[in-house]
Amino acid sequence: MKYIELMQAMVRGEIPPPPAGRLIGMRLVDIEPGRAVFELPVDLEKHANPMGTVHGGILVDVADAAMGCAYGATLEDGETFTTLELKINYLKPVWGGTLTAVGTLLKGGRTIGLTDCHVTDEGGSLVAHATSTCMTLRGDAASGR
């Protein structure tokens, strides 16, 4: 089964999100080749840092998921991927609401691809911007992943 087919089943609610997604509370809401959208209802009881805003690790988790799914949605059957590098810029604090993370494939190749993600608040204001380099795995490298 292609990665995108698995993710489409998740969007339709036919399969549950992975454990990390359930733990954080993020939800994949749209997926197409090269683009994925996640939503995260902010829960400061679970997501706050010591200053009372959403912890940066939570923001990077939702951005990483969006970028990875955007990349994964371009793969063929039997291929999988791994993240080689990830960078994020935090642009403003978040105290509540629902965050939206839109991951996009900027440049795909046979083995390496570049993605980015805009994380916005309910008003559409940019909260964080991330980039990621992903690598396609095939054959034995993809086995069991």
Image (cartoon, rainbow, N blue to C red):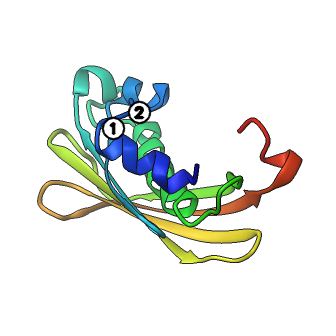
Q: Residues within 10 Å of mark 1 (few under 14, many from 20)?
A: many
Q: Residue at x 75, y 35 (%)?
A: 144
Give the residue type that dot 2 points to.
Pro
**How many numbered marks does the figure carry?**
2
Residue nearest the observer in this picture, 62 or 31: 31
Q: To which residue does mark 2 refer? A: 17
User: Which residue of the protein is positioned furthest toward the front in this rendering?
Assistant: 1
Using the rendered view, name the quadrant where residue 42 is placed.
top left
SS for dot 1: loop
Q: Residue at x 47, y 68 (%)?
A: 33
Q: Residue at x 47, y 25 (%)?
A: 19
Residue 3 x/y as whole percent = 55, 52
Quarter of the image with the C terminus in it = top right
111 shown above or below 89:
below
Residue 137 x/y as whole percent = 77, 55
Residue nearest the observer in this picture, 48 or 124: 124
Disc 1 + disc 2, Cβ < 8 Å: yes
- The reply, left or right, for residue 75 in relation to residue 95 is right
Residue nearest the observer in this picture, 73 or 98: 73
Residue 77 x/y as whole percent = 65, 56
22 shown above or below 34:
above
Give the residue type that dot 1 points to.
Met
Q: To which residue does mark 1 refer? A: 26
- The reply, left or right, for residue 14 in relation to residue 84 is left
Q: Residue at x 75, y 74 (%)?
A: 110
**Separation of residues labelled 1 and 2 (CA atoms):** 9 Å
Q: Note whether residue 96 is visible.
A: yes
User: Which residue of the protein is positioned furthest toward the right in this rendering?
Assistant: 140
Using the rendered view, name the quadrant where residue 94 is placed.
top left
Q: Depth-wise, is mark 1 or mark 2 nearer the camera?
A: 2
